[in-house]
Image: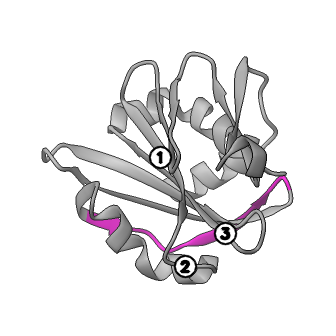
Amino acid sequence: MKRLILLSLILCASLTFATETYKYPAEGQAIMSIDFPQAWLVEKDEEMLHATSPDELVYLNLWALQEVTQVDDAIDIIDEVLAVYLQELELNDAETGSVNDLEMVFIDGSGEDMEGNPVTTSVVLFSPDNETVMLTFFVATPTGAQNNKNDIKEIITSIKKL
């Protein structure tokens, strides 16, 4: 049910909010852009883009997966990729959708962070150039997911290929 709600929220019309646009992976070689609310703390390094909600209850990572070139292959290794961040991970079945003419795969789940605290997670996989598989990974406390659901929806619906 949560999965359907998140997917519905993502695919619904967007609300207007003050944002800052980030291009990834590098300004000169960017293949995609993503917008974050100005209140979010966003840090960008050479490999990843990291963002934290103002209440620090939601954390986002975005990076290009080096191990795969197809989204379907990324689905097969997602447990392994997320094991660095989460334990006791239980993922729901993957669902597909389209945002800004980008085919995306959405996978929701739950588990524990490395300190044993319960968390929810949402993974979005997509390929803006049909060569690079991007992984957007949200992890949140249950309260954080609820409190920031509109921001999360806006962030996901802002993703565009360049």
Work out how far the residue at label 2 is from the one at label 3, CA to CA, in angstroms: 8 Å
Q: What kind of element bears circle 2?
A: loop
Left or right of residue 47, residue 140 in this image:
left
Q: Which residue is mark 3?
A: 132
Q: Nearer the viewer, residue 159 or 120?
A: 159
Q: Which residue is mark 1?
A: 61
Q: Which color scheme does this rendered protein use?
A: one colour
Horizontal and vertical percent position of residue 104: 69, 65
- The first of marks 1 and 3 along the sequence is 1
In magenta, the rendered stretch is 89-100
Residue 31 position by quadrant = bottom right
- The first of marks 2 and 3 along the sequence is 2
Work out how far the residue at label 2 is from the one at label 1, CA to CA, in angstroms: 18 Å
Q: Which residue is mark 2?
A: 68
Q: Amino acid at mark 3?
A: Thr
Q: Amino acid at mark 2?
A: Val
The residue sitting at 50% across, 58% down in the picture is 123
